[in-house]
Amino acid sequence: MRVVEVTAYGGPEVLRLGRRPEPDPADAPGRVRVRLRAAGVNQADLKIRSGRFAGVLGELAPPFVLGYDFAGTLLDPVPGLPVGTRVAGFVPWIQEGTGAGTYAETVLVEPGWLAPVPDSVDFTDAASLPLSVLTAAQALDLMALPEGSVVLVTGASGVVGRFAVQLAARAGHRVIALGDAGDAAELGLLGADGVVPRGAPEDVVTGVLGFAPERVDGVFDAALIADPLLPAVKDGGVFVPASPERMPAGEREIRVEAVAGRPDGARLREFLDLAAAGGLATRVADVLPLEEAGEAHRRAEAGHRPGRIVLMI
Ligand SMILES: NC(=O)c1ccc[n+]([C@@H]2O[C@H](COP(=O)([O-])OP(=O)(O)OC[C@H]3O[C@@H](n4cnc5c(N)ncnc54)[C@H](OP(=O)(O)O)[C@@H]3O)[C@@H](O)[C@H]2O)c1
């Protein structure tokens, strides 16, 4: 099968189209094969490819196949999901430690990672959801704030942050979104009560306090800004960074706990159904063929993408 391999740690040029044997379900009892049609390009893919995450990969070293998110069709049946069912999910790439990611024609997955994709959701949109929406949801779980709390979401113009804004609003929180000024109207439609444009940290804090003079109960920091945001958080509040790479120092009994996205097929199914019903918006910035994974990484690394970049397989 065709795959895109990371041949060595480095820039996007280390991504090469290659061939690997099709995975055999006999090698991993209980797992099923998915013939992929789309794979999302996540920020973690860039960090792994560059070598920035080499320390957490254990024995695993290039060459390996990147990729968390996938959408495609089942090649093996799962109870309730016959062969041919359109499915999506994500492979917990680092925890798996196999280097068999989704920049590939076929992957082997746990049935519990999968959710069926409603007919009205195309493969590219489906591949933009799994890791990002589940991480946003699990970040809100970690916050464990009562309904009506004031929540700041940073990186709200990005994929994970946009989902977090929507889910926090659905949970009944008052949401302050830190995002691009040009996205203010859209973030309002998605549920933000206030939008603070990105800028110097002190201006951001002033902007947040303008909406929440008492300070916020919780922060989901999808932009990984960390310590400069602490003055906007209440004593005893909660701060959830999107990655342990940037943890703010604890102070004033603010609980700091990074989120680590975990697959959850049942919950993903709810989100895909919600997306199909128009209750959850996703954005795909670019769709490129698998063999242009290097260009996809260049674009993702340049930033300012209005959504997920997806590889078509
Ligand atoms: N823990 C997990 O399991 C998990 C899962 C998924 C993602 N993540 C992490 O979550 C983060 C967000 O992921 P993503 O997919 O949403 O990435 P993304 O789509 O690139 O979103 C990040 C957003 O933050 C914005 N941003 C960067 N610096 C900012 C600042 N100082 N102020 C305000 N906004 C700022 C970016 O804008 P520009 O692009 O214009 O700079 C972008 O809109 C990444 O670090 C990713 O690795 C963690």
Image: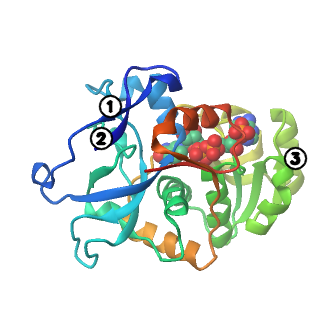
In the rendered image, residue 244, in percent from the top left (x then y), is placed at 50, 35
In the rendered image, residue 45, in percent from the top left (x then y), is placed at 47, 36
Instruction: Answer with mark 3 or mark 1, whichever residue precedes in sequence.
Output: 1
Disc 3, SS: helix
Q: Residue at x 37, y 29 (%)?
A: 56
Q: Amino acid at mark 3?
A: Gly
Which is in the foreground here, disc 2 or disc 3? 2
Q: Amino acid at mark 2?
A: Ala
Compute the Cα span from label 1 to label 2.
7 Å
Disc 2, SS: loop
Instruction: Answer with mark 2 or mark 3, whichever residue precedes in sequence.
Output: 2
Q: Which residue is mark 1?
A: 64
Q: Residues within 10 Å of mark 2 (few under 14, many from 20)?
A: many
Residue 196: assigned label? none
- The colour mode here is rainbow
Q: Is residue 207 above or below residue 299?
A: below
Residue 207: assigned label? 3
Image quadrant of ligand 1 equals top right
Q: Which residue is mark 2?
A: 100
Is 204 left, or right, of 44 in this rendering? right
